[in-house]
């Protein structure tokens, strides 16, 4: 983790309405409906319902335009209450988490100097796994959202922070903060839906390549930090010929430099410092990276993939109001119930609904406002999707496996439909390959 030493006026009273930007650094958008979504409509208009191809009913169809506006006002008020109450205890929280994370990492790497001994390898690897998870989840993810910019601390700021991940913070902030949080769960707009390699909704057209998506998802889980780096590069857009080549080359160099830096740290420098424990330390670092990848992938999967989470047609967000944006964030996200330790280790993304409503609020406050958000959902007749980790992970994987097959049709099995589709495509290819006879 690195931070530049730019000079800022420090404050911990939570009263600052704006935050200075470090010179020479890109701006970060925090994805709250006021700050980033200038496309949102502020006028109350008759609600327009866009049906989905699958024929699913609109879960917000019972709400009038006035209902949606009232809901938005309640959520705006809740956000303002938290903003007004930020202060010393919040600043102390993030500084403590950063301090604990660094101490765990330092102690774990010290123990791994003796990783040739099995007990040291186990303890050091476990500690390093925890440190890497904390770095990515409760620390890095939330700092890069701008949740702590109000402190005006140059060392804990979205424009200066870099994290322990293969993807550069600059690229992640664009793909995550600006795109995913703006177009949450909108088919064809939110590339976080399946990362461009999976079918995640019945409204998406099925093709035979989706049969392999359980395998794609497993591999993505194992190498998640590299998958995110590839996703942030928007490789799919390049392959489709829709991307800017100069931007891609520039970003590609950033990713390669970051991947090289991470590899040197974990697989060369620290193993060399271990002397005779070189190979054992290298294996420990690889294991810690794997554990971090599996954990972060699982938590993120639980945020938008479990059963009960809604997706949205692209046409449905045309003329979207702030209240409708709030609705989409609530219905397009899912929470995880669990202990305080689990919430911290998940980066408080276990409160995914609250995070998507208010991405720029301090993560330690999500648990505090969650009961109020749930009460608002229930009062307006909206589903508040939540469940324990094991249940949400199983549900998300169930969706991945189920949607790898075509939609069911009366009198036909899904496997039969898949086989018939593949057979039809093969016959078409064979016909196209037959040589044309000439007289």
Image (spheres, helix red, strand yellow):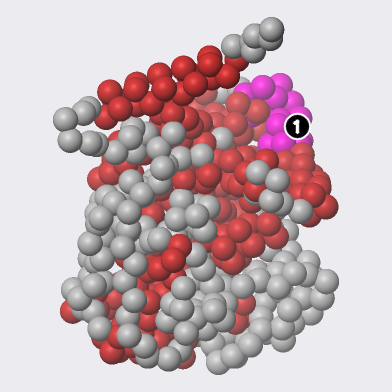
Quarter location, residue 156: bottom right
Quarter location, residue 289: top right
On-image quarter of the C terminus: top right
Q: Closer to the camera, 387 or 316?
A: 316
Q: Secondary structure at mark 1?
A: helix
- Chain part drawn in magenta: 261-281
Q: Closer to the camera, 255 or 349?
A: 255
Write the residue at 53% across / 16% down: 431
Residue 386 in the image: above or below residue 409: below
Total labels: the figure holds: 1
Quarter location, residue 264: top right
Write the residue at 53% across / 52% down: 191
Name the main secondary structure of what is drawn in magenta. helix
- The local crowd at label 1, few if under 14, some if 14 to 19, many if 20 or more residues have their Cα within 10 Å, is some
* Membership of 263 in magenta stretch: yes
Query: As drawn, is 108 to the left or to the right of 348?
Result: right
Residue 289 in the image: above or below residue 331: above
Write the residue at 52% across / 36% down: 220
């Amino acid at each position: 983790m690195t931070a530049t030493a730019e000079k800022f006026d420090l404050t911990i009273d939570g009263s600052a309405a704006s935050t200075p930007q470090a010179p020479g650094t890109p701006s970060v958008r925090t994805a709250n409906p006021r700050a980033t979504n200038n496309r949102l409509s502020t006028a109350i208009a008759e609600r327009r319902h866009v049906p989905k191809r699958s024929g699913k009913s609109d879960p917000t169809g019972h709400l009038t335009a006035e209902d949606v506006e009232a809901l938005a006002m309640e959520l705006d008020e809740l956000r303002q209450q938290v903003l007004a109450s930020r202060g010393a205890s919040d600043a102390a929280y993030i500084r403590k988490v950063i301090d604990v994370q660094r101490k765990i990492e330092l102690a774990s790497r010290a123990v791994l100097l003796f990783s040739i001994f099995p007990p040291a390898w186990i303890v050091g690897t476990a500690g390093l796994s925890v440190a890497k998870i904390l770095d990515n989840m409760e620390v890095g993810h939330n700092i890069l959202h701008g949740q702590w910019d109000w402190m005006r601390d140059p060392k804990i700021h979205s424009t200066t922070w870099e994290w322990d991940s293969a993807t550069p913070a600059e690229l992640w902030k664009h793909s995550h903060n600006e795109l995913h949080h703006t177009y949450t769960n909108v088919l064809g707009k939110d590339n976080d839906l399946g990362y461009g390699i999976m079918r995640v909704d019945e409204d998406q057209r099925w093709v035979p390549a989706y049969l392999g998506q359980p395998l794609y998802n497993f591999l993505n889980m194992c190498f998640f930090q590299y998958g995110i780096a590839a996703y942030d590069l928007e490789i799919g857009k390049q392959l489709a010929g829709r991307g800017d080549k100069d931007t891609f080359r520039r970003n590609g160099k950033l990713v390669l430099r970051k991947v090289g830096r991470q590899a040197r740290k974990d697989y060369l420098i620290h193993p060399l410092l271990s002397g005779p424990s070189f190979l054992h330390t290298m294996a420990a670092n690889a294991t810690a990276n794997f554990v971090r990848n599996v954990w972060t992938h699982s938590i993120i999967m639980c945020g938008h993939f479990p059963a009960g989470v809604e997706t949205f047609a692209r046409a449905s967000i045309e003329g979207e109001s702030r209240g409708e944006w709030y609705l989409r964030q609530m219905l397009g996200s899912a929470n995880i119930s669990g202990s305080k330790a689990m919430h911290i280790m998940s980066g408080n993304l276990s409160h995914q609904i609250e995070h998507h409503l208010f991405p720029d609020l301090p993560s330690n406050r999500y648990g505090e406002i969650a009961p109020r958000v749930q009460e608002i959902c229930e009062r307006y007749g909206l589903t508040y999707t939540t469940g324990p980790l094991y249940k949400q992970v199983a549900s998300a994987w169930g969706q991945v496996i189920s949607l790898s097959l075509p939609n069911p049709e009366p009198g036909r099995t899904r496997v039969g439909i898949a086989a018939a589709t593949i057979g039809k495509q093969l016959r078409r290819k064979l016909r196209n390959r037959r040589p044309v006879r000439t007289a």
